[in-house]
Amino acid sequence: MPASKLLRRILAVTAALPLLALAACGYGSEAKNDDTTKVAAGAKKTDGLDSVRIGYFGNLTHATALVGRERGVFQKELGATKASYATFNAGPSEIEALNSGSIDIGWIGPSPAINGYTKSGGKSLKIIGGSASGGVKLVVNPKKIKSLKDVKGKKIATPQLGNTQDVAFLNWIAGQGWKVDAASGKGDVTVVRSDNKITPDAYASGSIDGAWVPEPTASKLVAEGGKVLLDESSLWPDKKFVITNIIVRQAFLKEHPKAVEAVLKASVEANKWINANPDQAKAAANKQLAADSGKALPANVLDPAWKSIQFTDDPLASTLDTEAEHAVKAGLLDKPDLKGIYDLTILNKVLKASGESTVSDAGLGG
């Protein structure tokens, strides 16, 4: 099957998936809208807007947005322009919301950002900043898998066909010299596409032998007796790779640059506070998770999950390009033209004003 047809199949299948809770950067879900944030008295509107609609996922790799919302940082920077929020569980619904104008700015993973950009012919979105790196692990049943070579012949879950972790695992499998059909998941390793919501139960029942998953799912598996066999960060230069980006509708960026700048100021401020106050930030993120989902993460899941994620304003653009190459090699994507996917002009303005180092688009700006 040609990669372009397979990608369309992936998007069609995943768009029909049911609502998940705490899913990874991936595909298919509904959004929960919330615009109850109070606007400070006497504040002025930004760019004349009544509101800016911000989207993010309910997981720890989106903690910049979680903490920024919980601490009211977005609202502070936007003044009398109300910060409204929509929470998502996977990528296509957030991309759809962005394209339809239901949200203006969003936190999202690299694969849906790449797919959204290429599917629109480079017209739908821009990546305007980074948010997080890391937080992805291969967790296995230690009774069945004692070393990396033991993964061969086993059943390993990924969140969804063609999502960020699925692509990474398929690339790792190829690096071992093993073969797997990307579409079916069958081969020297059986790749089981399993919603993060049900993966811990699948592991506990023995129907899978492990999973290549983001946090907090990885730490949930460890809490079920699993063992971390590989941290994906060990496979990347400087142990850094993009797991969460900030994207914006191109029309919104063009028409409301001051509003975009306000959100990016808030994001930079949130990341600075997170890195300076990790324990307080962890608690703030968990508090917002509880508000969004109705359930906070227990300490035995929250603590190890938090330690594996790095929060950074740098979008780590070169690693996004590499992740796209991995998807092409796996047969999930035709070679994309990513020139122009980044516009870091406003972010670098904000970073420079705050005394921070500017960041690179790795030649993918425009």
Image (cartoon, rainbow, N blue to C red):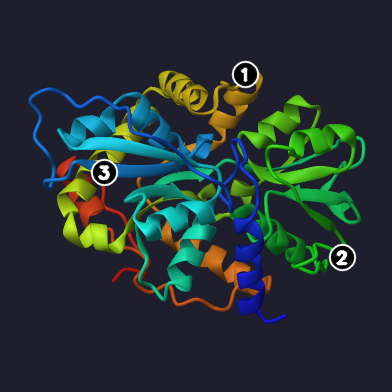
Q: Tag 3: Cα neighbours inside 10 Å, few (<14), some, or many (≥20)? A: many
Q: Position of residue 78 (x, y in %)?
A: 19, 37
Q: Position of residue 156 (x, y in %)?
A: 80, 49
Q: How many angstroms separate mark 1 from mark 2 (CA)?
A: 36 Å
Residue type, mark 3 in image = Val
Q: Closer to the camera, 263 or 316?
A: 263
In the depicted structure, whether residue 223 falls above or below residue 4: above
Residue designated by label 3: 52
Residue extending farthest to the bottom is 2
Residue designated by label 1: 298
Residue designated by label 2: 187
Secondary element under disc 2, as helix, strand or loop, is loop
* Screen quadrant of the C terminus: bottom left
Which-is-in-front pick, marks 3 and 1?
3
Secondary element under disc 1, as helix, strand or loop, is loop
- Picture residue at 76% right of the left edge, 34% below the top: 200
Which of the 4 quarters of the picture holds residue 36? Answer: top left
In the depicted structure, whether residue 140 falls above or below residue 315: above
Does label 3 or label 1 sit earlier along the sequence? 3
Does label 2 or label 3 sit earlier along the sequence? 3
